[in-house]
Image (cartoon, rainbow, N blue to C red):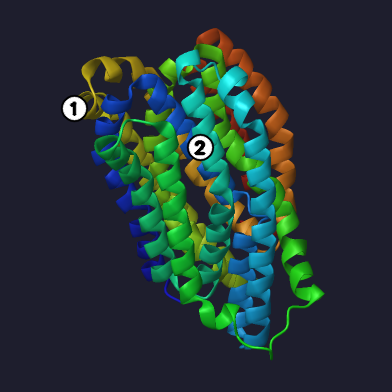
Amino acid sequence: MSLKRNTLWNLAGSALPLLAGAALIPYTLAALGNESFGVLTLIWGLIGYFSLFDLGVGRALTVKLSQLGATGQQADISATLRAGMLLTAGVGLLGALLVWALAPRLAGQWLNISPALQPQAQLAFVMAAAGIVPTTLASGLRGALEGLDRFAASNASRVLLGVWMFAVPAWAVYAHQPQLGTIALYLVLGRCAVVLGMGWQLRGLLFPGWRVRLQLRHLQSLWSYGFWVTITGIVGPLMVYGDRFFVSAAVGAEQLPLYAIPQEGLLRLLLIPAALTGALLPRLASMASDEGAQAYRQSYQRVQWLMLGVCLAAAVLAYPALALWLSADFARAALPVVLVLCVGVWINSLALLPYTLLHARGNPRLTAIFHLAELLVYLLVLWWLSSRLGLLGAALAWVARVALDWALLRRAAHRLYGV
């Protein structure tokens, strides 16, 4: 298991979709207009949310399969993988029903969408609901591939899904009328195709024959780990993507691109530490305590200084880059938000290391408790600041939340593991 190789695969899996977004977002924004594009970012937010809302099974599969693979327990690998797919399919169906039921209110009442656009938005939300089952399945399959040290295959699927997310809106606008429902339909079809491809790669483990039977203990082994990851899977993405819904309700969907586009771009910078921690997770899960502590400290120092340089560069280059990419007016209006979010991205990158260590050592309970404690405070502060300061207030609330998260995780890692 090569940390460097797997980190590079993870980096490629996240960076290539980012390049696609940089190339295609200006065309899509110009064709759809601010408000329709704002609704599209909400659809992306729903997809991003439910890709992590998988009962914690994706992360649990990474840890469990890496441990089983180290001991050569092939039969348990197959049974555990099948149990994971059963759990992710079930939670995906529940998520789909929830979004389908809420679609009329999301489009018509809650998100301050103009009446002319509400029918399109409602249809798009219904289409997005249909894509939640393949989204959760993809999350579980990707976790399994990484637990089996198949990072190349995992990131090939990530590249396809990421590029598809940005390419389909541009292609749909070019080939058809700029209808949000059509865009959402193509997004869902692409996810279904990628899930089938990932399942084909794991067909030998998913369908090993009658000799391997799924037992209750396989479900329990994932559930016992994944329950607390589930809490984080619900609460964590809500605190990452949920601010867009508050901003839309507070200031209107028309202004949302000034917040969502910079946020989407800056959050992509986290692909650098996420690439490392994603490769580090199965290693820490199987390492001895002393060896794991050393690997953690080295990784923390690397991320700390590397991301400080990256975030400083992003702050300096933000205005000219946005002016060249979109327009000078857009860059001028978005710059205060960008500068605040750059601080938050650096802090959040540091939090990924203790978060990964706690999960690798089988202690996701603490991260879930921290996120639950943060959520209510964050939502209150977010609503208060965004109502009074608009986009800048939402950015300040997000930075305060990630700073609290980093402090709690860092303290827990130090007290439990001495790092």
Name the kind of residue labelled 2 in the image.
Gly
Instruction: Residue 40: give x, y in percent of width and height.
Output: 43, 32
Disc 1 marks a residue whose amino acid type is: Leu
Quadrant position of the C terminus in the picture: bottom right
Q: Position of residue 203 (x, y in %)?
A: 52, 78
Task: Find the distance from the CA under tag 2 to the CA under tag 1.
Answer: 26 Å
Residue 51 placed where, x, y %?
A: 55, 50
Number of disc labels: 2
Question: Which of the labelled discs sits on residue 1, or is there none?
Answer: none
Sort mark 2 into few (<14), some (14-19) or many (20+) by Cα contacts within 10 Å.
Answer: many
Let me know if residue 399 appears in the view: no
The answer to whether any part of residue 106 appears in the image is yes
In the rendered image, the vertical position of residue 5 relative to residue 345, given as above or below: below
Front: mark 2 or 1 = 2
Depth check, front residue: 112 or 300: 112
Mark 2 or mark 1: which comes first in sequence? 2
Residue 122 screen position, x and y as percent: 54, 29
Which residue is at the front of the view, 315 or 116? 116
> Which element type, helix, strand or loop, lies under badge 2?
helix
Most foreground residue, 38 or 334: 38
Read off the residue under disc 2.
45
Residue for point 29% across, 36% down: 176
Q: Name the residue: 63% across, 54% down.
A: 54
Local crowd size for mark 1, using a 10 Å CA cut-off: few (<14), some (14–19), many (≥20)? few
Tell me the tag on residue 324: 1
Along the horizontal axis of the image, is 45 left or right of 207?
A: left
Q: Quadrant of residue 309?
A: top left
